Amino acid sequence: MCPSYTDYSAVPHGPYSSGAQKIPSMRPPLVCRTFNNPTIESAIRDISSSIKDPDWQQLFSNIFPNTLDTTVAWHNSSAPFTFLVTGDITAQWIRDSSNQVLPYLPYTATDSALSMLVLGLINMQAEELDAYPFGNAFQPPTRSGLKPTQNGIGVNLNVFPKFDNKAVFEAKFEIDSFASFFQVSSSYWRATRDARFIYNEAWESAVSKILDIIVLLQQPTYNGRVLNKPVVGYTRLTSEAKETQFGSGLGNPVKYTGMVRTLFRPSDDATILPFLVPANAFLCVELEHLSNMLKILRVFPDIRDKAMKLASQI
């Protein structure tokens, strides 16, 4: 029986590198890896052979395949759908899961199993964000057979819009989740020219909802006559300021700048200044990539134009 990677990684394993640091070999046994891929194994051998320092060579061999070795909690290759866990929690963060597969994109054009893994992730994210666009981390789908994880800090919350903890693991709204979803979608398409995901009804719906939310979050707190209607809010009974938001959960007040408000940073810590510049820059770039992809594919002209307009405003 395979131990959890949390337990396995707590103990150094051999063989150790021959360098001064004696780096252990921390990949789980072959039978315990969550996704085995010959293309990536070949890439590890090829790249490792070009690294002269044995310690760095061992580090690369440990790190590069880690997503495949330890985080593919569920993958349906026929649909396809993929659920990637982040760390030791059986939950999928939009931002993290996107970044977990980006290093493998150069190999997806020639490896169908790998491309289905990434395509499945895009489909899974689309389904999650279509159901609840304000979530940053999601529970495994019921059909996966995986049990939902109880969120230890998901108590004493007042979140708007309401969410179902059986489907959403955490509802800390972060605009980098939007950008990451766009990034993995357009990056996968550029690597493979496989556009099947855009014809997934959930993908189009999720993108449309996200763009509508972005427009609302550009608006000022006060429009000159009255307070604008709240879009998203998060408060929690806590002694840590980073775990809740100002202004009854709505964040500090803002004027219109073209940028987009966010309640939380990529660290999952609350923002003080709602216009988080790095996240807005990321979102701007990925809106442009989204628009350019749809332009080349000649689909969804309304979404294409709206995405480019928002990018220019940000």
Image (cartoon, helix red, strand yellow):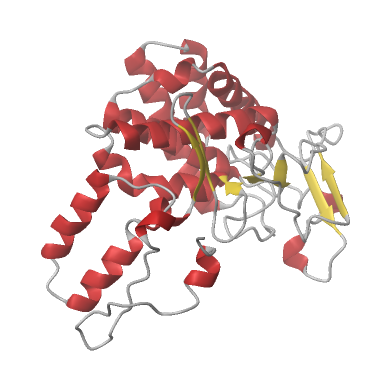
Residue in the picture at 47% in, 38% down: 284
Seen in the image, is 175 located left or right of residue 55? right
Residue in the picture at 31% in, 40% down: 105
Residue in the picture at 14% in, 68% down: 51
Q: Can residue 288 be seen in this view?
A: no
Q: Which residue lies furthest to the front in this view?
A: 1
Seen in the image, is 50 located left or right of residue 7? left
Q: Is 300 placed above or below 6 here? A: above
| x, y percent for residue 222 | 80, 38
Viewer-closest of 264 and 110: 110
Seen in the image, is 3 located left or right of residue 171? left
Seen in the image, is 211 located left or right of residue 105? right
| x, y percent for residue 67 | 42, 53
Viewer-closest of 15 and 83: 15
Q: Is 3 placed above or below 247 here? A: below
| x, y percent for residue 307 | 49, 25
| x, y percent for residue 242 | 72, 65
